[in-house]
Amino acid sequence: MSEPTILDRIVARRREDVRAAKEAVPFVELQAKARQAPPLIDFAARLRAAGPVALMAEVKRASPSKGGIAPGMNAARQAMKYARAGAAAISVLTEPTWFKGTLEDMEQVRAAVGQLDGRPAVLRKDFIIDAYQVLEARAYGADALLLIVASLADAELRGLLELTREMGMEALVEVDNAAGMERAIAAGATVIGVNNRDLRSFTVDLGTTDRLAGMVPEGVILAALSGISARADVERFAAAGAQAVLVGEALMVADDPAEKIRELVGVPA
C-alpha cells in the first residue's frame, strides 16, 4: 500500500475531530445555535459585485507546508484590516491541528465584519467531510464553506453541496486537476476554486489554473487559489478567466495587509 498523502492524514484526523465534536455538542444543541446565527449574504453575488477580480483574503495562523505563519494573530483584527481594504470575502481557517484555526476565530470574524456596510462574505475554510460541519459553519457565522473534491466521493460532494444550499449558504468547490473539475461541474458547483497547490504533496504550480480555466462553464465563477503573492499573479489569472483569487500567506506576513490588498487588486496607494 502507498503511503498516505498529507490530505489523507488531515481528513483522517478531521473525522476523529468530528466524532469528538458530536459528543461535546450534540446535533440538536448545534441546531439551536444555528437558528440564532446572524443573517447571511449571497457569497457568489458578493464575488461578482467586487469584480473584475474579487479578492478573498485568508485568516490563518499556520499551514502544513510552512508551519507557523502568525501564531499570535487575532482573527477579528486581521479580518477587519482585510475588510476595510476592500476584500470581498474573508476566508477563515478553522482546522485546528495543521492550520491552528478554530470555529471561534470565524465567529469572532463574523461579529467584527458584521458592523460594516457592504460587509465581506465569510468563508469557512476547512476539510468538510460531514453534515455536522456544515451545520457548524452556519452556527458560527459562515456565508459559505469549502468543499474539496479530492476528499469526497461524488455522492458525498453532491449531498454536502445540497445541504449547504438548504441552509442558505454556498460552497467554494475546490479542484486541482481536470478530473476534479469534471466532478465539480457535474455536482452543480457555481463557484469553483482551482488550487494551484497539490493537496497530496503541497507543491505549488501556478499553471494549474491556466490549464483548467477553459473547462469552466459560462455562469460559473472561477477562483484561483494558492501561490498568489503579487499583482502580476492576479493579472495572470484574470487573463485566464478567473473572477476571484484567494490570498493567504502573502497577506498574513505583510507588514501592512491593507496596502498589500490594494497592490493585489490594482488600487493606487
Image (cartoon, helix red, strand yellow):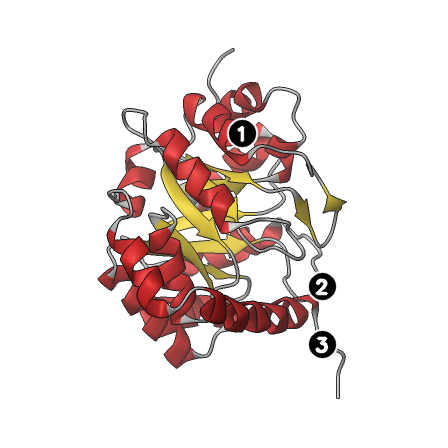
**Could one spot residue 42 in this view of the protein?**
yes
Residue at 40 percent of width and 72 percent of height: 157
The image shows residue 182 at horizontal and vertical percentages of 42, 70
Q: Quadrant of residue 3?
A: bottom right
Q: Local crowd at mark 2 within 10 Å, few (<14), some, or many (≥20)?
A: few
Q: Quadrant of residue 177?
A: bottom right
C-alpha gap between disc 3 and disc 2: 10 Å
Viewed as shown, does residue 255 lie left or right of 109? right
The image shows residue 192 at horizontal and vertical percentages of 41, 56
Nearest the eye: 79 or 204:
79
Nearest the eye: 175 or 97:
97
Q: Which mark is on residue 4?
A: 3
C-alpha gap between disc 3 and disc 1: 34 Å
Type of the residue with mark 1: Gln
Secondary structure under badge 1? helix
Residue of label 2: 201
Residue of label 1: 78
